[in-house]
Image (cartoon, grey):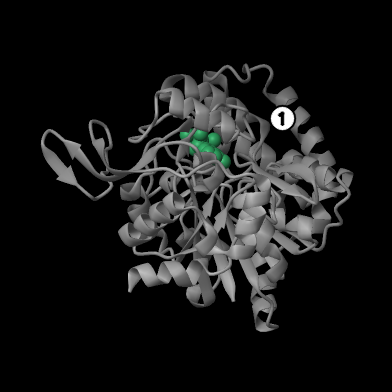
Amino acid sequence: MNAVVVGAYWGDEGKGKIVDLLASDFDWVVRYNGGDNAGHTIVAEGKKIVLHIIPSGILNGKSVAIGPDVFFNPLSFIKDLEEVHSKGFSPGRILIDERCHLILPYHIALDSGQEKSQNIGTTKRGIGPAAKDKASRIENITVADLISGNFSQRLLQAMNSKKAELVQYGIISEDSFAAYAEKIFAEYSAYSDKIAPFAGSVAYELHEAVANGKSILMEGAQGALLDIVHGTRPYVTSSNTVAGGAFANIGINPKSFRIIGIVKAYPTRVGEGPFPTQLDNELGKQIQEEGFEFGATTGRPRKAGMPDFVALKYSAIINGVEEWAITKADVLAGKRFSAAVYYEKDGEKTKKFPLKLEGWKPVYDKEYFFPTISEQQAMEMVKGGYDSLPEGLKEYIKDLVQYTGVPVSMVSLSPKREITVIKNVLERTWECLR
Ligand code: IMP
């Protein structure tokens, strides 16, 4: 079986842990979108590691690939690889698609400059400006360009057509253009030798892998509600985060892929943009602290909210989710919480996630509660499976399943790989749908 793993809300759902857990069953782990705006924190073999662009499957010695729609910052890749080596992990095959678009220093500078007026709350990693250049078809530079003999020519061509914009944002003056280009050329030429051994075609290599009976796990960055098309525009990222993006962006037949949605027990959001169930109170702060909700890439605090079934149903639809993996359920232990079951605005009610969220207020149903879970109890729940979970948690899971029409296959109770309840979860939650 092949699978796509996708975040259900606005990212930071804990996909890294689930991918790390699942990776042992797959031959390849592939990143299909985003760039180094993402950060996956994984606790594996007792070591904490944060990866920004390399798929977390690398920790299991699997073959990993960075697909052609990933915006590629060579320095982030080199740093990730150093981190993997320094923590004592031995990487398997690493493949970077030669079609990946490069993030260049001026993309990062433009991202910061443009943020002042657009206020999207980006990670300032240059993703938006690099995506604009990709769409321009002329101003983009790819990994293939970087490792080719004519990188200098391509860089100058791209930069020349961006000159006015770079001057407008104060990144260069008319006089400093040549020196700025020279500096970038020198820096990126040094990266080129380190990148070249990994460059190739992900579409061809994965096609061959599938033909040889190998299995593939595709890992999305961010979450479905940050999708450039389906998300809460304009407060979104610049790529297709939804599961379907994996097939378009990698260039692979979707038929044999199972779609796994990662749903954090409570949503979080970082950056700007509406967040209907945001908790602007003590409970929100408690969840933020106990869930370590601080950006892995930017260190920014993530706003935390109540579970939102309206958003999850939408996410189930736009991704085609076939099963949910619930992460960080332990963080809700000891807290009274509810889930949004519809939204209301000026007397109007809806169960459909609105295009413009402003003014819509979530309406909650029943209250859930389950007591704090010690590590030893969590280990027992791993052995006992779904039936041994606390009643309040099972009630919440059952309602989530019935509302979204999607069963749950895993419940994570700790950042540790081994503390994930899998036994009986899928079959018991299927029963809720019959
Ligand atoms: P960008 O992707 O840096 O352009 O940021 C656009 C929006 O996506 C901002 O609201 C960011 O906070 C958000 N975003 C980007 N990457 C992540 C992520 O990995 N987790 C959560 N939010 C993200």
Residue in the picture at 39% in, 29% down: 279
Q: Disc 1 on helix, strand or loop?
A: helix
Query: x, y (%) of residue 325?
Result: 52, 58
Total numbered labels? 1
For the N terminus, the quadrant is bottom right
- Given residues 162 and 317, the one toward you in this image is 317
Q: Is residue 353 left or right of residue 149?
A: left
Residue in the picture at 63% in, 19% down: 172
Q: Is residue 317 left or right of residue 105?
A: left
Res 152 seen here: no
Residue 155 to residue 183: above or below: below
Query: x, y (%) of residue 267?
Result: 45, 41
The answer to which image quadrant residue 191 occupies is top right
Res 360 seen here: yes
Which residue position holds label 1?
181
Query: x, y (%) of residue 87?
Result: 86, 45
Residue in the picture at 70% in, 83% down: 212
Residue in the picture at 75% in, 23% down: 179
What amino acid type is highlighted by mark number 1?
A: Ala
For the C terminus, the quadrant is bottom left
Residue 14 to residue 426: above or below: above
